[in-house]
Image (cartoon, rainbow, N blue to C red):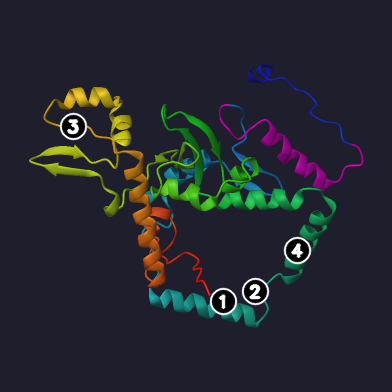
Amino acid sequence: MCVNNFEFIVLEYIENYTEDLLKDKELYWMDFYNSTNGNYGYNLRRDSSTSTTVHPKTRKLLSELFSGENNPNYNNRWSDKQKEHMSKVKKEMFSDGRLTVNLEGSKKGHKERSRRIIEIPGYKEKMASRVSNSKSKYDILKIDRDTLEILEEFSTFRTLKEKYPNVGKTVIFSVCNGNKKTYRGFLWRYRCKISEEILEPKIKPNQKKRKVINKVTLEIFESITEACKSINMTRQTLQAKLGETTNVVVPEKIIIEFKEALVFALMGVLRVEQLTNVLSSVTGAKKDSSSGVLFIPN
């Protein structure tokens, strides 16, 4: 019998318990043993009277089960006459008291939540975490840029921030969205919680680095270092492959610094003229801007 395959143990002894404490403990042990994960447990939902969180795989199965023609409301569109009739019925029910808003229940729930926030340590943070998890559609993955191995995964940015307090939200999202290549030496990607598909960033028109000339695809790189890393070659090997007709030249340090100085000088001129000098496509910001502090001598 299948029951013989299970071991029954006491997880915790509790004295002076309340119903709310037992509900919180139920959720705690579900999380501790990750029992909503099919590889570890048999809970289809993370739920008690305090909350209900459906596992992404269960959501996917329910979606497939009741999608399209399997949905009882499939292709059931109300006419304007039906909508008008239902509106009239609801208004009549409100006017004669058959339908009311449960204000007392709402107040009671608010009062109970306030009590728990005051009396139960960490309850507010736990509640905020549950809300954040329920609203989040994507996991955030930390990936090794050389091996492409997933090093860490976070259900929300909130959990990422708890482990890495100094991580910037904007810059992580910029890498996930393709506006930046890496952050702190790692790739960062979104993963859909329902389909579990890792989403590669979309390349914007001004970020495309491929050209097709005579039906031959060419890669365009910003530097020799980037090219060598992309094709996994040293500079000497690349030179040997290209032959004597092409020289691989790495500029002297002073030329590189001069180029950067010109760029910052241009940014300064644009700032003085109150023109855009910071592009959102580079920084990951929502819009272009004109940034910088002007120091004008007396």
Q: Which label is found at residue 99?
A: 2
Which kind of residue does numbered mark 3 sit on? Asn
Q: Of marks 4 and 1, which one's residue comes earlier in the chain?
A: 1
Which kind of residue does numbered mark 4 sit on? His
Task: Find disc 1 in the rendering and name its residue.
Answer: 90
Residue at image point 54% right, 36% down: 153
Q: Helix, strand or loop at disc 3?
A: loop
Q: Which label is found at residue 110?
A: 4
In the displayed structure, does residue 123 sit left or right of residue 279? right
Task: Find disc 3 in the rendering and name its residue.
Answer: 247
Residue at image point 72% right, 19% down: 7
Viewer-nearest residue: 17 or 153: 153
Which kind of residue does numbered mark 1 sit on? Lys
Q: Helix, strand or loop at disc 1?
A: helix
The span from disc 2 to disc 3 (Cα, nearest Å) is: 83 Å
Residue at image point 41% right, 28% down: 146
The image shows residue 4 at horizontal and vertical percentages of 68, 16
The span from disc 4 to disc 2 (Cα, nearest Å) is: 22 Å
The span from disc 1 to disc 3 (Cα, nearest Å) is: 80 Å
Span highlighted in magenta in the image: 15-39
